[in-house]
Image (cartoon, helix red, strand yellow):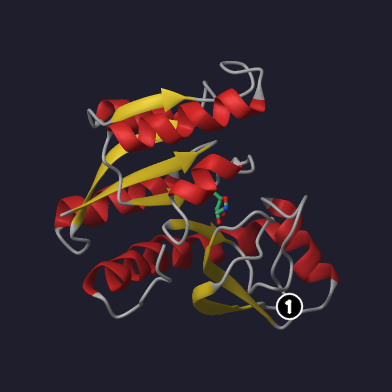
Amino acid sequence: MKKLAVLVSGRGSNMTAIINACEQGTLSASVELVISNNEDSLALELAQEKNIDTCHLSSCTHADANLLDIAMQQVLASHNIDIVLLAGFMKKIGPKTLSAYKGRLINIHPSLLPKFGGQGMFGLNVHNAVIDAGEKETGVTIHLVDGEYDKGAILAQTAVAVGVEDTPESLAAKVLKVEHVLFAETIQKIIDGSIILPAN
Ligand code: GRF
């Protein structure tokens, strides 16, 4: 059984979808640890209700970025984490954690990367930009994390049609629904070997 850590910042609906998939057995893994850079995130509360170990790690807990990076690497190692999922995590991963979990750090992004990714492209900013650009479709991307925002190898994508009636909010809701399915499905494919991650 693969051990997952989920990194969050906010409401944690993707984290919840992953936990549910583990509980229902559609994802043969267990969420062992939830890390948030935001002490007040709903996701932390939800994880605690599920008796999952949680940890707040940010510049508030570690002013020195190097020490923050070391703390993250250590807490992941102490939980024997196999795969780290970024589900709305708002901070860059430090170089030590990146190298310790190279090819095992996976992010979900609410657009069809490489479109509408990079710094500042989060939340409604993404969906606003999609509508402003007159796109006929958007979607969800699951990708490996490297040192740059939204640039790592793409593992899976699902398209979502943009309707003329769509607002950024309605589009966000449609995309989020797909996120909840695609994230768990993709992680299961990694676990059962139908998606092969690059070797460490
Ligand atoms: C999702 O849209 C995800 O794609 C992005 O951040 C959002 C997190 O939402 N990276 P939630 O906290 O999982 O509800």
Tell me what residue is drawn at x 56 percent, y 16 percent: 61
Q: Nearer the viewer, residue 70 or 136?
A: 70
Residue depicted at 54% across the width and 36% down the height: 9
Identify the amino acid type marked 1: Val
Q: Residues within 10 Å of mark 1 (few under 14, many from 20)?
A: few
| Residue 153 on image: x %, y % | 56, 72
Q: Residue at x 15, y 55 (%)?
A: 1
Residue 148, above or below 115: above
Across and down, in percent, residue 108 comes to 52, 59
Mark 1: secondary structure: loop
**Left or right of residue 142: residue 60:** right
Q: Quadrant of residue 109?
A: bottom right
In the image, is residue 56 above or below residue 22? above
Given residues 38 and 99, the one toward you in this image is 99
Of residues 31 and 42, the one nearer the viewer is 31
Q: Residue at x 40, y 71 (%)?
A: 197
Against 169, residue 54 (above or below) is above
Judge left or right: residue 146 versus residue 106. right
Name the residue that disc number 1 marks: 164
Count all numbered tags in the image, as a single digit. 1
Residue 19 seen in the current view: yes
Instruction: Indicate yes or no: mark 1 CB to ligand 1 under 8 Å.
Output: no
* Residue lying at the far bottom of the rendered structure: 136
Residue 131 horizontal/vertical position (percent):
78, 69
Which corner quadrant of the image does residue 114 belong to? Answer: bottom right
